[in-house]
Image (cartoon, helix red, strand yellow):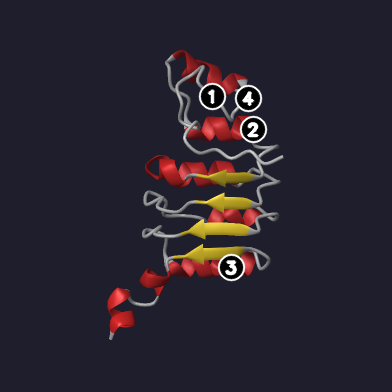
Amino acid sequence: MYIVIIATVLAFAGGFGTIAAMDQASASAASSGFVPLEDCIRAECQRLKALNFFLWSNHVTNATIFALAECPLLGFLDLSLCDRVTDISALKNCKNLKYLYLVECTRIPPGMIDELRKELPDCTIVDSLIRRTGGLKKFLT
């Protein structure tokens, strides 16, 4: 079963659609009306297989990536447009990761993406072709 977190991940307490349970560590945050994204991920970490943050890209940070690194079954991850992310090195722990989308994640150094490709040889990593090849101008000339 794939759990895809799109818009409901950052829902206010009581409005969770794809996150079925929150652990005790999230209880204090829930009482304030907001549950941090990382707590939601950790609460369901052992069951998460696919995540798509496309619609919530401005809420994903390096802390989110470190929480995702604890998800042993994670096989698909779309971080497209997650411009606040600068470090994806922790994803090397996701040995079941087969597809990783980093389109327009402009703050992740290309060398870090290349290193992750070495660490996860069975993972297809799609990053920004335009950024890595010198921009659109290079294609037009």
Give the residue number, with chain letter if any, for mark 1: 16
Image quarter in which the N terminus is found: top right
Label 2 or label 4, whichever lies nearer to me, is 4
> What amino acid does circle 3 point to?
Arg
> What is the secondary structure assignment of the residue under circle 4?
loop
Residue 23 lies in quadrant: top right
Q: What x and y, as percent, mark residue 115?
A: 55, 68
Give the residue number, with chain letter if any, for mark 4: 20
In space, the residues marked 4 and 1 are separated at their CA atoms by 7 Å
Label 4 or label 3, whichever lies nearer to me, is 4
Q: Is residue 107 visible?
A: yes
The mark that comes first in sequence, 3 or 1, is 1
> What amino acid does circle 2 point to?
Glu
- Frontmost residue, 25 versus 51: 51
Question: Position of 124 compared to 138: left or right?
Answer: right
> What is the secondary structure assignment of the residue under circle 1?
loop
> What amino acid does circle 4 point to?
Ala
Q: Residue at x 58, y 54 (%)?
A: 91
Q: What x and y, as percent, mark residue 47?
A: 70, 37
| Residue projecting furthest to the top | 31
Q: Is residue 61 visible?
A: no
Give the residue number, with chain letter if any, for mark 3: 117
Q: Are marks 2 and 4 in contact (CB under 8 Å)?
A: yes
Label 1, residues with CA under 10 Å away: few <14, some 14-19, many ≥20: some
Give the residue number, with chain letter if any, for mark 2: 44
